């Protein structure tokens, strides 16, 4: 079963991800703070991480950097509602993010397809 870790301070978002992806065969792990997400990433080694860019405490770009240090094979998808997307988006991709999605998500189906793309043949 593919492990999907979602790190986001908005409970409605993490619940939405869990409710959508669990019936589709994913084991959904949830963290509501960057530090918790790092601990789960280290312990569980998820194949995919959805990381909110703006969270209290540890910022999403730092979480991305540390998760890729823990497990370079993890595919990280950044979820951002911040302005100035172009700059942060290109920076995040340079840092190793697989892709970026805008919040609010317009389509969970599109997100699911990107996750499948990220996993390639391992799904």
Image (tube, rainbow, N blue to C red):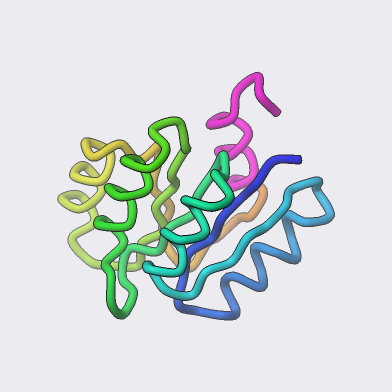
Answer above or below: position of 58 versus 1.
below
Indicate left or right for 4 with 19 as reference. left
Residue 38 appears at what percent x and percent y?
41, 59
Answer above or below: position of 31 versus 99.
below
Query: Foreground residue, 42 or 26?
Result: 42
Magenta run includes residue 118: yes
Q: Quadrant of the N terminus?
A: top right
Residue 62 appears at what percent x and percent y?
25, 57
Residue displayed at 45% across by 77% down: 9
- Total numbered labels placed on residues in the image: 0
Indicate left or right for 79 with 82 as reference. right
Query: Foreground residue, 105 or 64?
Result: 64
Magenta run includes residue 68: no
Q: Residue furthest right?
A: 23
Residue 113 appears at what percent x and percent y?
62, 38
Answer above or below: position of 62 versus 68.
below
Q: Quadrant of the C terminus?
A: top right
The residue range painted magenta reads 110-123
Indicate left or right for 66 with 88 as reference. right
Residue displayed at 60% across by 23% down: 120
Determine which quarter of the picture holds residue 53.
Answer: bottom left
């Amino acid at each position: 079963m593919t492990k999907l870790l979602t790190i986001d301070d908005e409970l409605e978002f993490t619940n939405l991800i869990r409710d959508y992806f669990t019936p589709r065969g994913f084991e959904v792990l949830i963290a509501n703070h960057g530090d918790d997400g790092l601990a789960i990433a280290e312990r569980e080694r998820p194949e995919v991480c959805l990381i909110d860019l703006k969270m209290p405490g540890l910022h999403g770009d730092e979480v991305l950097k540390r998760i890729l240090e823990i497990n370079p094979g993890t595919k990280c998808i950044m979820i951002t509602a911040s302005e100035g997307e172009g700059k942060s988006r290109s920076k995040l991709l340079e840092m190793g993010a697989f892709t970026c999605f805008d919040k609010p998500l317009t389509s969970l189906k599109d997100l699911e397809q990107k996750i499948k793309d990220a996993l390639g043949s391992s799904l």
